[in-house]
Amino acid sequence: MGCLFCNILEKKIPASIVYEDEHAVAFRDVRPIAPTHVLVVPRKHIAGIRDLSAADATTIGQVFLAARQVAKQEGLEEHGYRLVVNDGDAAGQTVHHIHVHVLGGRDFTWPPG
Ligand code: 5GP
Ligand code: ZN
């Protein structure tokens, strides 16, 4: 049991990891909704945006820098891509370990559903 993404970080559950550094790890979503769908998570367990404190500023900044690196290596920068962070039930958050969805390889509509 425990946190699904912590288990992935600890390599107890397999995942297709595409990037990792000191602060963040990125792996492919098991149910992709776009040709590229990667999740970027901090190594530190933080349940959601609502749980962030000022002490997490560097960590969350590093997560976004990692997301940009993923977009770059996936070849998404030229056409553009979307980053999504769901927080709480209304937004559809299902895994309570902060993650940034990196979505690309197709066009997206606005507003989102
Ligand atoms: P959320 O809905 O919380 O913003 O996003 C959670 C994401 O985690 C979903 O897109 C879901 O497909 C993905 N996911 C759920 N379980 C697993 C898993 O075991 N492995 C991977 N790689 N992704 C998962
Ligand atoms: Zn966790």
Image: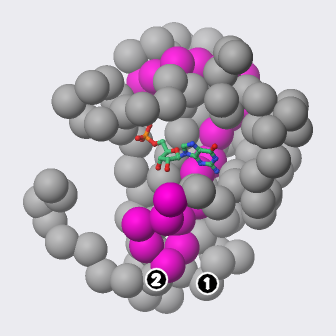
Of the two numbered discs 2 and 1 in the rendering, the one whose residue sits closer to the viewer: 2
Q: Is residue 53 left or right of residue 26?
A: left
Above or below, 10 against 67 in this view is above
| Of residues 96 and 64, the one drawn nearer to the viewer in this rendering | 96
Q: Amino acid at mark 1?
A: Gly
Q: Quadrant of the C terminus?
A: bottom left
Q: Mark 2 vs mark 1: which is more N-terminal?
A: 1
SS type, badge 2: loop
User: Which residue lies at the image location 64% right of the left edge and 39% below the top edge?
Assistant: 41
Count of numbered badges drawn on the protein? 2
Q: Is residue 44 left or right of residue 99?
A: right
Q: Secondary structure at mark 1?
A: loop
Q: Residue furthest front?
A: 1
Amino acid identity at mark 2: Gly
Q: Is residue 76 visible?
A: yes
Label at residue 105: 2
